Image (tube, rainbow, N blue to C red):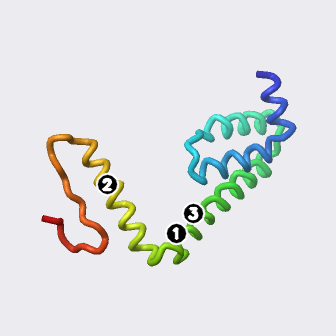
Amino acid sequence: MHNVLEFLVRHGYLVLLVWVFVEQAGLPIPSLPLLLAAGALSGIHRMNFFVALGACLIGAVVADSMWYNSGSTKAFGSSSSSAEFLWSRILAFAVHKGSSRNKARVPCSSQNSFPA
């Protein structure tokens, strides 16, 4: 455990930036334990709190901007219609897996009512 803390003290700001960026980009890794360790290290004056906070903010804003730009581009046609279609397929899959007896039908973005 001592080696991990020394590594975090030595490279902590870069680790925080990359870790928060990767989590916000979509990889399901928890950043809370790393943020708690950074807070504890800044509490004993081994890390600068404001630099660590800035690194986390930069990582989160860059990843969120990446997601915003990917959703606002017209690469797949209209971004709202492709997003609606994606969510309708996700909901259809979730409803289908949730109850095997009830066959729920979710409308696509181009349809105004449920299919027959």
Q: Residue at coordinates 67% horizontally, 52% vertically from top-left?
A: 21
**Which residue is at 58% across, 46% downward?**
27
Q: Which quarter shows the N terminus?
A: top right
Q: Which residue is mark 1?
A: 71
Query: What element does badge 3 sit on?
Result: helix
Rendering quarter of residue 9:
top right
- The mark nearer the N terminus, 1 or 2, is 1
Residue 91 got which mark? 2
Instruction: Judge left or right: residue 1 versus residue 88.
Output: right
Seen in the image, is 111 located left or right of residue 39?
left
Q: Position of residue 66 (x, y in %)?
A: 62, 64
**Spatial separation of the CA atoms under disc 2 and disc 3:** 21 Å
- At mark 2, the secondary structure is helix
Q: Nearer the viewer, residue 35 or 74?
A: 74
Residue ID at (65%, 61%): 61
Single out the residue that lies furthest toward the top.
1
> In the image, what residue occupies the spot 66% across and 48% down?
20
Pick out the residue farthest to the left.
116
How crowded is the residue under tag 1: few (<14 C-alpha within 10 Å), some, or many (20+)?
some
Residue at the disc numbered 3: 67
Q: Amino acid at mark 1?
A: Gly
Q: Would residue 32 be found to the left or right of residue 80 on screen?
A: right
Where in the figure is residue 54, as x and y percent of width and height?
74, 55
